[in-house]
Amino acid sequence: MCFRHCQLRRSAEKARKAALEHLVASMRDGAFAPFTQNAVVQALLVPLGGIGVYALDILAKLKI
């Protein structure tokens, strides 16, 4: 009796975990996508990231 109870509980936990993973994965699309996944934001971050590296290079040369 205890074995069946434990087996049923384990199966329920696996199903709950799979449902939660599916829910989280489906929320990564559309309006719920992370801000950094937006194509416009990515297009702006690439050049700005290069400017930051360039500024660090200048500061390293000035030894500030």
Image: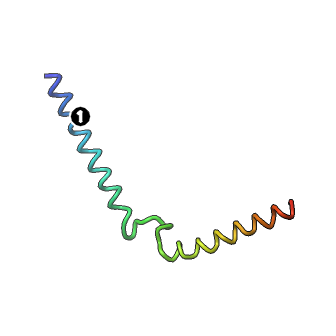
Assign a secondary structure to mark 1: helix
Q: Which residue occupies the extreme left position in the image?
A: 1
x and y percent of residue 33 in the render?
A: 42, 66
Q: Nearer the viewer, residue 16 or 40?
A: 40
Mark 1 neighbour class, 10 Å CA radius: few under 14, some 14 to 19, many 20 or more: few
From the viewer's perspective, tell me whether residue 28 is left or right of residue 56: left
From the viewer's perspective, tell me whether residue 55 is left or right of residue 62: left
x and y percent of residue 36 in the render?
A: 50, 67
Question: Which residue is labeled 1 in the image?
Answer: 10
At 36% from the left edge and 61% from the top edge, which residue is drawn? 27
Is residue 41 positioned above or below 16 on the image?
A: below
At 38% from the left edge and 62% from the top edge, which residue is drawn? 28
Q: How is the image coloured?
A: rainbow
At 53% from the left edge and 72% from the top edge, which residue is drawn? 42
Classify residue 11 by image quadrant.
Answer: top left
Q: Please, what is the three-letter code of the amino acid marked with disc 1? A: Arg
At 59% from the left edge and 72% from the top edge, which residue is drawn? 46
x and y percent of residue 60 in the render?
A: 81, 61
Q: Nearer the viewer, residue 64 or 31?
A: 64
Classify residue 26 by image quadrant.
Answer: bottom left
